[in-house]
Image (cartoon, rainbow, N blue to C red):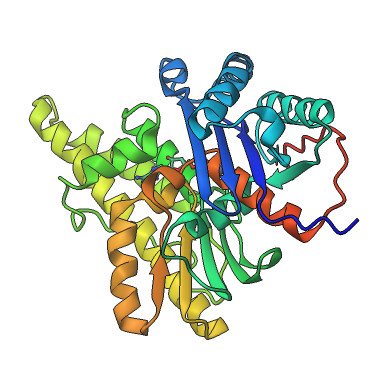
Amino acid sequence: INRVITAMKILGIETSCDETGIAIFDTDKGLIADQLFSQIELHAQYGGVFPEIASRDHIKKTIPLIKQACEEAKISLEDLDGIAYTAGPGLIGALLVGSSVGCSLAWALDLPSIEVHHMEGHLLAPLLDDVKPEFPFVCLLVSGGHSMLVDVKSMGDYTILGDTLDDAAGEAFDKTAKLLGLGYPGGKILSELAVHGDKTRFKFPRPMLNRPGLDFSFSGLKTAVRITWMREIAEENYNESQHKDQLVKDIAASFQEAIVDTLVKKCQRAMKQTSYKTLVIAGGVSANSELRIQLKDLDKKLRIKSFFPALKYCTDNGAMIAFAGAMRLMKEQNHNNVIKAYPRW
Ligand code: KG4
Ligand code: ZN
């Protein structure tokens, strides 16, 4: 059959953690629907993501958001050409919601279902922008669960140049925020406070910079911050809350500086190693404004060009899954509707 597929509409379902993200990507028109429900308020009282509550809320939101996405795109389910869903990594219960809804819907509509790796979704998110990076590029992928440098030769051709040996960058942000009593979601709150802090007050270690290679390790930095915090609290008279507030801001700024400095120097190394001229930053931590500022400086220094996703596509969303699914479907056509969920993919 010589049916030429001119344009495809792919539904994307993201339920790997604490955001229900549903979007529709049209290979002709681009993103035609984008729905997101953030569970932040549900988890805030626990200081972190409560997995069972996450799963239950995804169950409540997934189908209503799919309906809303169809309304937004002014299409019906029958107009879809494929269903993409995050198959991992992530929380098993949360993943199972998206994968079972996605596969069931695909089966009912007689469409292919496409399992998407959450990190590939993040990695491709900058391609949703009007001004897109071109292959090949180096991608600094920094989220709550991963910190990686990836050599991206083309769609699907990825070589990991460096990985985290312990905590991911976002995890380090979150744990430090928790230590400082900033609550959840820590990374964003900490970075907002850091703007008002003195980043030179504390000199925290820049992990792994004195060694060759592109791997990351942030657990030592986290410990250094903890020791400083405990010492300061014990030694100084912080009864005056104003002083304590300033201490928190200064630690936040000094910690952020150590992390950003480490990430930027590793990016510099990766650019030299590959001789590529394009750097892409993606994942939740790519929303960090200090990281954006310092990488823009690196652009000038190395005569490269760096690309960041729009802020709403840095953290978890359905658009990146719909897009990655569309790219995968165009490349390889054999997709079965076996429900897949790989928490540690
Ligand atoms: O990509 P993402 O939404 O989820 C995962 O795939 O893990 O990333 C979430 C991570 C969290 O650790 C969060 O603290 C961090 O991204 N994050 C930030 C900022 N916004 C989100 N970290 C630093 N600065 C920010 N502005
Ligand atoms: Zn993510």
Image x and y of residue 71, in percent: 52, 26
In the rendered view of the protein, which quadrant contains the C terminus? top right
Image x and y of residue 235, in percent: 20, 36
**Residue 344 versus residue 67 in the image, above or below:** below
Image x and y of residue 184, in percent: 39, 28
* Residue 68 visible (yes or no): yes
**Residue 12 versus residue 49 in the image, above or below:** below
In front here: 64 or 169? 64
Q: Which residue is drawn at 77% across and 58% down?
A: 4
In front here: 18 or 98? 98
In front here: 258 or 336? 336
In front here: 101 or 70? 70
Farthest residue toward the right? 1
* Residue 144 visible (yes or no): no
Of the four image quadrants, the one with ligand 1 is: top left
Q: In this view, does 47 lie to the left or right of 167?
A: left
